[in-house]
Image (cartoon, rainbow, N blue to C red):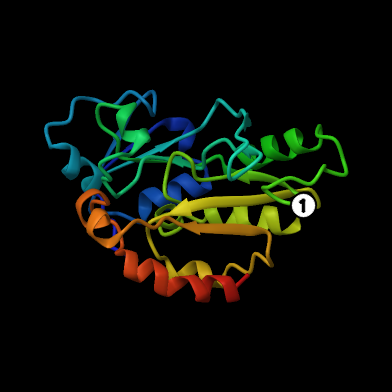
Amino acid sequence: MQTFQPSTIFYTPDALNERGQKALLSHPAARHEVIQQHNRLPALESNHFQIKSEVLVLGRLKTLVCRESGRSSDFISPSLANGCMGACAYCYVDRNKAVNPITLFTNTEEILAAVDKHVQKQVWPKIPNQTHPLYYTYDIGCNSDISVDAALSDNVQVAVDFYRKHPKAFATFATKFVNPEMLTYDPQGKVRIRFSLLPHKVSKLVDVRTDSVEKRISAINDFYQAG
């Protein structure tokens, strides 16, 4: 996986908890600039691809809503992050923003508390369905790539710890990157990672700046064996 080294970090004051400060100090050579809203950036002169490579935003997610999914998960969790280092041609997240650098939400514990509150309201035991026969399944990566986020902050590892211990909730996410560090997270079967795969010729054209399909396939067994 490519290393993400931002040259500019925008941050909102309410994002600078311990996690936010650590992320800020992890890139001392970057220019730091305070903003008032994480989704309203100042005008950026670089092109879309440069912004994805050079800009990081730190914010606090305030809309802590779990939404119904009904496909690969029962629900969609509030996002741990928004945006991605990749630039896939068909990305629905990018279509919703003029520019879309990675925005890390530093209030991970609040996000996970919202998931806990939501799942506790569901009927238990769960009626088995295609997502899982026992647990309510939450997609934690609809607006970002969790493998990339995990390289920038401890928020993903904290989330994996939460789902591993939770008696009712189960996490899932899709990725186009391979982050070997995540093999140490020990989810004990409570997280489902979905490596996004396309035919090689198609992927080379549309999966811009992601790990190759071959690399993703070769990682599957390692992640399966790691739980």
The reply to whether residue 6 is in sight is yes
Q: Residue at x 37, y 60 (%)?
A: 177
Please give the residue where the numbered disc 1 appears in the rendered image: 133
Badge 1 marks a residue whose secondary structure is loop
Q: Is residue 186 above or below residue 47?
A: below
Residue 116 percent coordinates (x, y): 74, 40
State the quadrant of the N terminus: bottom left
Q: Does residue 9 appear to the left or right of 121 in the view shown?
A: left
Q: Residue at x 63, y 51 (%)?
A: 171
Q: Does residue 194 appear to the left or right of 166 in the view shown?
A: left
State the quadrant of the C terminus: bottom right
- Give the quarter of the image for residue 187: bottom right
Q: Does residue 54 appear to the left or right of 18 in the view shown?
A: left
**Could you say which is closer to the camera, residue 124 or residue 47?**
124
Q: Does residue 56 appear to the left or right of 69 in the view shown?
A: left
**Could you say which is closer to the camera, residue 38 or residue 32?**
38
Residue 174 percent coordinates (x, y): 48, 52
Given the image, on which type of amino acid does mark 1 rest?
Answer: Pro
- Give the quarter of the image for residue 148: bottom left
Q: Is residue 182 above or below residue 82?
A: below
The mark tally for this picture is 1
Residue furthest to the right: 125
Q: Is residue 165 above or below residue 68?
A: below
The reply to whether residue 155 is in sight is no
Q: Residue at x 33, y 23 (%)?
A: 40
